Amino acid sequence: MKTLEDSKIFSWLHSRYDLSGILHLLYHKKVPVHKHTIWYYMGGVTLFLFLIQLLTGILLLMYYQPGENSSYESVRFIVNKVNFGWLIRNLHSWSANLMIFFAFVHMFSVFFTRAYEKPRELTWVTGVLLLVLAMVFGFSGYLLPWNELSFFATKVGTDIAGAVPVIGEGIRTVLRGGEDVTGATLSRFFGFHVAILPALFTIVLVVHLFLVQKVGMSEPDFFKKLPDEKKKFISFFPDFAIRDALLWLIVLYLLIFLALFFQWDLGIKADALSPAPTGIKPEWYFMFMFQSLKMLPPHLGFIEGEVFGVLFFGAAALAWMLIPFVKFNSKKYTKERIMLVLGTLVVLFIVSMTIIGYLL
Amino acid sequence: MGNNGRRKFITALLSIGGLGTFISAFYPVVKYMTPVKSGKPSVSSLKLGKLSDFAKNAWEIVRFGRKPLIIINDENGKLHALSAECTHLDCIVQYSKEEKMIICACHNGHYDLNGKNISGPPPRPLKQYKVNIQNGEIIITKKEDG
Amino acid sequence: MKLKLNLFLALPALFLLFNLQANAFSTASQDSTVDNCIACHQDNDNMPDNYNPEDIHYKVGLSCFNCHGGNPKTEDEDAAMDPDKGFLGAPSKEEIPAFCGRCHSDFAFMQQYRSEVETDQESQYYTSQHGTLLKKGDTKVAVCSNCHTAHSIFSPNDPRSSVYPANLPETCNACHGDAEYMKDYSIPTNQYKLYKTSVHGIDLYEKHDMSAPVCNDCHGNHGARPPELNSIPRICGSCHVKNLNYFSSSPMGKEMEEEEIHTCETCHGYHDIQKASDDFIGTGEKSFCIECHDEGDEGYITAAFIKSRIDTLKLKYSTASDDMNNVIIKGMDDIDISFKLKEARQKLIETRTAIHSFDTSQVNTIASQGIKLSNEAIGMAQKEMDEYYNRRTGFIYSSIALLILGLALYLKIRTKNGKDKKA
């Protein structure tokens, strides 16, 4: 079979630039085959959705005009005047949501297989960073159509950021570009969304991908214990890649389907003077935090409930990111047990809070 | 079917499907990038055609984005562009050639050609727009002062 | 020679006159001449209660003696306020209209201050309810100073003025809202309270619309009195022109006037005129028509018909606006629909005005236009929604392409797997 090395272009490039490093990254990696192989695909799907975001985002930029008097109008223009504008916008919205969903799935699959352990600590850290960045992406992008719901959600969201002790007020003012959510906030969020975040995200993503290729796929415990002759592998390229391609195709199809049959509303233009509509909800991936903050009592001892919640989530996210470096000195329980219980609790917490948030 | 034939079939399928997928992704993008005729999402000025095509002592209602404007060419050939929404209840006003005034059919509000409310229920004047003539063409723009 | 002499005599005389005039009007400026009225009254702390140095008279250079007489130049109290030398002092209430009228009824004098000026306030006043009663010796009634104040007088266009539109209702209410003060007159004292809740009062106080009618716009100011029965439609009609035109050309309007039935007021009330409701017409509980018309008579049928047309139009219009809102929320193009709806809304307003013709055919013509426009808007909204849900052309083609590619990839994986197994 014809391989990459046989192609003329490749040999032309190879003879000049020595691509063996890249080849090595591609070929040396072997993907273990076992009953949990499916989880190896989740990161790839997330990456694919990010690429879709990049493409559709660039396309949206061609027509989008940030500004109090133009944001909403230009999105409306994209949706109902520009050819396939509705498709691009809906793909962008759907892909954003799916990307965060798959990032969560990817993260928990890594967590439960304890793939973050040595030598993949930094892969985990960059991964958690990427998820946080993706959520900030979502938060900033949500405001850009400048409709009523996003306007008030941003108000609430930035208010929560203001609850951080000492620096909270400052963060809120910087985020909003003033005391209140105004056109200045819109310009700022636009800047974050199309310049700062993509740059940061790309850098972290490149490091993350490089580390993944460099260190290779993690093998779960039961697989490691197998005798060598019973371990089955497929090559990352082309065998795994072709499966990836098939899955990406399926995801693309799902995306198009969703974009077609479940279009996102544009809503009513934001008006700072109109009263807040009832039932403002953040995007679903913030719901568990939003709901927990809402359920906290106004005072926890000497500290305000909301402040406690914000500090708690901040600390939790940091701890979560640093999990690979945590050492346990318990004789009674193994680290595996502790992590399993912890992970299950976290998932249960997130899922139940999200459900409560939507039901109440 | 031999192994060779099967491989050829798959390659053909791969090429066709790949090409098709590429086209179905590329086509919307190309169409998307093609500018649409119906203008811009928001409006700051409006071209109204040649001044010479506008009869004297005539008027018409035109759209300025989401706002209706009344354009009046008075008997002296001076153009007036004003918001066409009556300040009383937002009805569309009209020009009365007999009275040489802008009137609102809903409650008989009267405005002069500068938009000043003269009689009837309108509480405020009509907003004026700027009329520019460039190379014989009428261009309406918003006035700076709100 | 004779002419020359005359001129010779006339010049000093003119000069003298000019000088006097200048003196009379320049006392308020920082002239060397001291105004002893103010100086002395200020020293003794007995300036008038409501004295305001911003007062319009004082501002144009008129001082105490211009109204009250006396001599401001002398420091001798007795000489300054010598009745024999023209000191008038404070006028009694009966004297006030004439007291102010000395200048305000003198066109030539008033014209010095403003080119266009009305000088009929005093004569108007004596035609008013206030003036008529004053003549009969009733001193409880309002005179000039009750509305304009005595020493804090401003132009009616000045927001500080007691007769500035936004302040006027309270000025009238100072007496008319005082039940104790008004107890000798058999008129209500809740006008101001009612007015505040009226559509006009809300326009004035909540929307700060200074063109909203206040007391004097219906009752007159200097000639204030309750409007005559048959002048009601014309007074309301001075703003609500179209309504008046419809009303006075209708057979019912004429009959009401002839039979001296209260016209506009019958349905709309007066001081507490509320925003008109469509339920005023028809045969429902809140309808005014059924107060006179009985089931089966012509008026009853007319009322029912007009009501049904307006209800249909309203329903169509609200359906159309709901549909347009949906179009907006979906992000589809609503501009054409919104213009169509504006026209429909206009027809709804015109229909409501045309009700005052009490003529089924006039109402029907306009209402039908509105219904047609609403239906068109509904159709346009439907088209937008159809387009929204029909953006699926091309999906089938791309589906086929994606399916083929997917199949090819799948087969490729299968072949590989087979090979791996064999190996």
Image: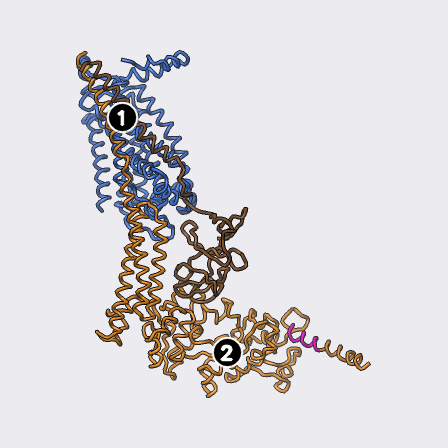
Chain colours: A blue, B brown, C orange
C277 displayed left or right of C91: left
**Mark 2 closeness class: few <14, some 14–19, many ≥20 residues within 10 Å:** some
What span is in magenta? C17-26
Image location of residue C71, percent across then percent down: 64, 80
* Residue picked out by circle 2: C144
A344 in magenta: no
Q: Examine the rendering and report whether any part of residue A154 can be seen.
A: yes
Residue with the most extreme right position: C1
Q: Quadrant of residue A1?
A: top left
Q: Nearer the viewer, residue A354 or B123?
A: B123
Q: Is residue A69 above or below residue C92?
A: above
Q: Which mark is residue A327?
A: 1
Q: Nearer the viewer, residue A66 or A310?
A: A66
Q: Quadrant of the C terminus of chain C?
A: top left
Image location of residue C266, percent across then percent down: 32, 75
Instruction: Please report, as a chain letter, where disc 1 is located.
Output: A
Amino acid bearing label 1: Lys
Residue with the most extreme bottom position: C136
Q: Nearer the viewer, residue B73 or C241?
A: B73
Amino acid bearing label 2: Cys
Q: Quadrant of the N terminus of chain C?
A: bottom right
**Mark 1 closeness class: few <14, some 14–19, many ≥20 residues within 10 Å:** few
Image location of residue A149, percent across then percent down: 32, 46
C414 displayed left or right of C280: left
C-alpha span from label 2 to label 1: 94 Å
Q: Nearer the viewer, residue C79 or A26?
A: A26
Q: Magenta part mainly helix, strand or loop?
A: helix
Q: Quadrant of residue A41?
A: top left
Q: Examine the rendering and report whether any part of residue A133 can be seen.
A: no
Instruction: Please report, as a chain letter, where disc 2 is located.
Output: C
- For the residue labelled by badge 2, is the local secondary structure a helix, a strand or a loop? helix
